[in-house]
Amino acid sequence: MTHCGEFTVDLNRNDIQALAAAAGLTIEELLQATAALAHHQEQQPPGSSLYQRIGYAGGLLWLVNTLYQRVLADPLLMSYFRHLDDQHRQRLRWHMLTLLAVVTGGPSKYQGRDLHEVHADLHITEEAFDRLLWHVQGTLQTLRFQREDEKAILAEVRARRAAVVTLEESS
């Protein structure tokens, strides 16, 4: 169990090595980035990428872990995750982290399955997607992401709506 700032990360050494490798960092660099997040409130210089401004892989880890705490506690969303064991939930977090690394300009390559294929049998509704989006926004605000970075991340999540929503609701 690793403590960083106001959050706890439940990772073993293999998880940390895999996370660092996917982010293109050494373990030491990943741990330094994660520790620096507690102090990462000042503005970044113009021209820095979103991935840099949010604190590299450490910032994404912070974001994903905080987001999943909210999502897994939400009665509307928990049914989508109830059948998963801890290992599968950890894998979901990993895929979310690598996807966010890609969409924020990080060095990772998303190697998960096609988003539509993954969500096809889950019967995700517009309402559930909107609730997830609400949690993403709340998480970004709680973690004090800059407003422009919040907008950019929300736009990337919204852009994947068609691939994730797999159940058309009747009016």
Image (cartoon, rainbow, N blue to C red):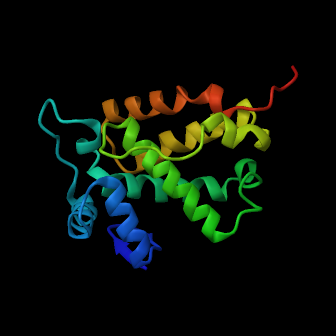
Residue 46, relative to residue 79: is it above or below?
above
Residue extending furthest top?
171
- Dividing the picture into quarters, in which one does residue 162 lie? top right
Which x, y percent locates residue 139?
A: 47, 48
Out of 102 and 50, give the one closest to the viewer.
102
Give percent across and percent down for residue 18.
39, 65
Q: Quadrant of the N terminus?
A: bottom left
Which residue is at 53% across, 57% downward?
A: 93
Q: Residue furthest left?
A: 45
Given residues 147 and 80, the one toward you in this image is 80
Quadrant in the rendering for residue 148: top left
Q: Give the answer, above or below, for where 25 lies relative to 44.
A: below
Residue 14: percent from left, percent from top = 42, 74
Q: Which residue is drawn at 26% across and 69% down?
A: 27
Residue plotted at (64% across, 30% down): 163
Residue at 74% over, 47% down: 76
Residue 94 coordinates in the image, percent (x, y):
49, 57
Q: In this view, does 133 lie above or below 28?
A: above
What number of labels is visible?
0
Say whether residue 95 is left or right of residue 21.
right
Quadrant location, the C terminus:
top right
115 is higher (above) or lower (below) than 4: above
98 lies left or right of 161: left
Residue at the outermost right position: 170
